[in-house]
Image (spheres, helix red, strand yellow):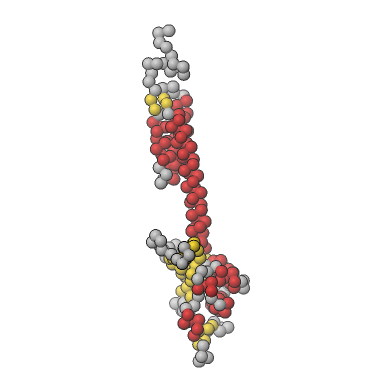
Amino acid sequence: MSRIESTFGVPDAVAQKTSGLAIGSLVCSLIVCCPIATIVGPLLGIVALVKIGGNPALKGRGIALAAILMGVVFTGAMTLGGYRFWETFGVPVMKGPRDALTAGFVGDLAGFKDAFHGAGANATDAEAQAFIDELRDRYGEFTGSRLDQRRGAAQPAFGQPSAPFPYVLSFDRDTVAAEAEIIFFDEGTDRMVMKPASLTVFDPDLGDLTYPPSEGESDETEVNGNGDPETGDGG
């Protein structure tokens, strides 16, 4: 024989070079700040393996395998992290006051108050019932709510314990704008909360409604069965 072949059938005169696809796949898989890159990385790694297997002049099989493994792991971790973030923060913000109002309109005052944090959770049953009754008298039965994207959601600063979010509340007789102050965490205990602290319904005709009522409002004003305010002195 005029030349001696190596154990793997590659002539000694032919020098192997590392696959550019394998290197590219590894680079993409390591860009963990970009979810698309960690998806592209494993795909390039698979292509690189095919190319390397069909060309004895190429090497980089280990690099391609590492890229595939890391890309899959990083993509899975980011997907799980994104899901948990959505469940923890996104879902409560999207729902806003929905659970509270749903409970209140079926007569579950305990459930209504439990959906709030702070003063809203500690308000009296009479205050909670008065708020629900007034909403029902004005707009009818509660049918749903949604985050009002047109008014723009708040952009809380890092470490900010709460932020206001705009909502549209739907009733069977009307639809009204509202705002809920969402508590992210309790400053006293550093415990995650993700519940509304208060809910304000905007009504330029009949007047705004806020739950829980301020201390002065709860002491001086009550709501009668017709939804009209009455002062505490009967005047």
Does residue 48 sit above or below 182 in this rendering? above
Q: Report the residue at 47% width, 28% height from top.
A: 50
Residue 58 location (% of width, % of height):
41, 25
The furthest residue to the front: 189
Q: Report the residue at 41% width, 63% height from top.
A: 160
Does residue 155 sit above or below 200 in this rendering? above
Residue 119 location (% of width, % of height):
50, 73
Which quadrant holds the N terminus?
A: top left
Please give the count of numbered marks on the rendered protein: 0
Residue 173 or 73: which is nearer the viewer?
Answer: 73
Q: Report the residue at 46% width, 67% height from top.
A: 188
Residue 66 appearing in the image? yes
Residue 159 or 171: which is nearer the viewer?
Answer: 159
Q: Quadrant of residue 98?
A: bottom right
Residue 146 appearing in the image? no
Residue 23 or 137: which is nearer the viewer?
Answer: 23
Q: Report the residue at 42% width, 36% height from top.
A: 26
The furthest residue to the top: 1
The furthest residue to the right: 107
Residue 27 location (% of width, % of height):
39, 38
Residue 224 location (% of width, % of height):
56, 84
Does residue 229 sit above or below 43 in this rendering? below
Residue 32 or 140: which is nearer the viewer?
Answer: 32
Does residue 235 sit above or below 194 in this rendering? below
